[in-house]
Amino acid sequence: MENEAGALSRVAGLFSARGYNIESLTVAPTEDPSLSRMTLVTRGTDEIIEQITKQLNKLIDVVKLMDMTEGPHIEREMMLVKVQAQGERRNELKRISDIFRGRIIDVTDETYTIELTGAGDKLDAFLQALDKGVIIEVVRSGVSGIARGDRSLVL
Amino acid sequence: MELTGAEIFVRSLKEEGVDYIFGYPGGAVLHIYDALYQQQDVQHILVRHEQAATHAADGYARSTGKPGVVIVTSGPGATNAVTGIATAFMDSIPLVVFTGQVPTHLIGNDAFQEADNIGITRPCVKHNFLVKDVTRLAETIKKAFYVATTGRPGPVVVDIPKDITAEKAEFRYPDKVSMRSYNPVHIGHAGQIKRAVKLMRGARRPILYTGGGVILGNASEPLTELARIMNFPVTNTLMGLGAYPATDPLFVGMLGMHGTYEANMAMHHCDVLVAVGARFDDRVTGHIEKFCPNAKIIHIDIDPASISKNVKVDVPIVGCVGNVLRVMLDEIKSNDVRSDAAALKDWWQQIDEWRSKDCLKYDRDSDTIKPQFVLETLYRLTKGEAFVTSDVGQHQMWAAQFYKFDKPRRWINSGGLGTMGFGLPAAMGVQFAHPDATVACVTGEGSIQMCIQELSTCTQYSLPIKIINLNNGYLGMVRQWQEFFYQKRYAMSYMESLPDFVKLAESYGHVGMQITRTGDVEGALIEMLKLKDRLVFMDFLTDREENVYPMIPAGGGQNEMILV
């Protein structure tokens, strides 16, 4: 979509005005600074998805749109988790983080901050693997998506 | 030579061929008003409330096909305009609305008369622009007109901060617009058109269901030719009235909640439905599960999002309805396609049987004025040639039922949003565009009071509008629903202190008449039409509890009508 002020609120406004639900939304400028790329996750019947697609295409700021789920595609989400890491817990947390291919990116005497990338269910699984009590803070990025193979969303 | 933003604004309007701009001045647009003052190409029309500016521009647009243009100041000027913008949006009317904005450095500062015009109008515009750089003002105005008038038309807002109108830039008006993210479709898919023709050829009980898109797309001619070649019945939506001549024998009347029995029954029983520039609105379909149960549906529309939105269609065709219908006609003519004459003979026999119910009958012997009689007489006396605007409610439905529009762009009403207060200001826009035409505003004592201040504008510009006020002392449509569905508990549908409309009209310098008996209706209307250069306010005291029939109650199917 056009990298213009207000483009994002047009998309968000369309979803709230028409009663659709945004599960997650990720947006950032692309290598062409006049364009932004947005990955938006929503849910609905085929008819609703068709209507959402058409309504989004009608927005003047939307340049090109692709339903990732129409073909094989990759979804990635990034998560930062701050956990209580004291005493013998520190080793245990390091081990779990390694199993999930997480990286500890900040350390204090009492905490670790772990970075984890993957599909949403992997991130969910990681959170479940942690003791509830140790989690101080979780921040997730929302999904970024790209099609597998030759299929691509470019101008 | 460098011009100020305000001068660029005026020059851009001239480039766009704008003859009228409807508006109201205020602090943020003073530079622009100063520039307007110093030229003669664009005439500014001063309304009495910004809502009326948008409705007047809207009436101008609907009656001409050209975009309506509005200017209002920041803050309350813009918020007052919102109802008119939303009205145009729902009916896909091309408007370009310029809103003043506080100077750039004060935006977001809760400055005096500041409102987030872009944010407030976003859900009811086709697109909006905030101009942040005077060098881009001309280009933005060009884009605004382009977006408003192409594809599925609609209102576009251009928000201009005050400092931009004072800053200077070289004026160069672009010849063309290109927007990578906006490329409206024109031509329909050839294969789909062939499929549609095939379906139509085999149809045994076909009907053409045509809407406002035919008028917006100037497609009345090919539609009429198609209907006649195929001998198919035609029904129009409220927005489509005039798209097909109402006095033609193939016309079965308006459809929907207050449509004719024959139109709704033909819809319910059809086997092939050809929808042209119509959007399957809930007031048309009735209960969606019961809609056209046996029909294959062809849908021609310029907006892909309108197709299969409410009703799944079998043959979608995206494109300008005029283009698509012409290609369809070529296909029919070059292959000598004929419709099924024997089947159509039976179908027409069935339709004529439904017609014989005479679903629009009313008591013609009543001494109390029947609103239907007023409109029938207006139709007869104006020979169907008047431009008729309306407000919203019972009078709107009666006008739609009893004034037979043979030409497009003669029937001007707020269909989608249903905006009371629309009729009088819209009539002003129509009268400016057609100074010699008879322009009648059909209204009620509820609706007219929502923009009655415009009687003053009509005085200032000597607009000879004929106001047909069907005064029953009730908010009639609300009262009708309360009678049918709330055991006659008439909650707040009655106003106790109506003004003396005759004196009110006179106080503005107009002519007022009050008519209380059926026997006086025709004579009064004749007198009204003789007063060619005066606004005449006709206050008809009508039957207080007359209802609009037929009616499909909410949740009903098209075959489940309440008849008189």
Image (spheres, grey):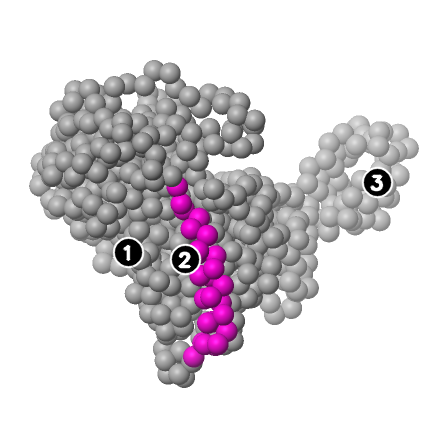
Of circles 2 and 3, the one toward us is 2
Q: Is residue B36 left or right of residue B72?
A: left
Residue identified by numbered label 2: B252
**In front of the other: B8 or B193:** B193
What segment carries the magenta color? B338-362
Residue identified by numbered label 3: A128
* B63 in magenta: no
User: Is there CB contact under 8 Å for labels 2 and 3?
Assistant: no
Q: Residue furthest right?
A: A88
Numbered disc 2: secondary structure:
strand
* Label of residue B508 in the image: none
Residue B10 versus residue B472 in the image, above or below: below
Q: Are callouts 2 and 3 both on one chain?
A: no
Instruction: Say which amino acid is labelled 2.
Output: Val
Query: Which residue appears at 29% of the width and 52% of the height?
Result: B405
Residue identified by numbered label 1: B406
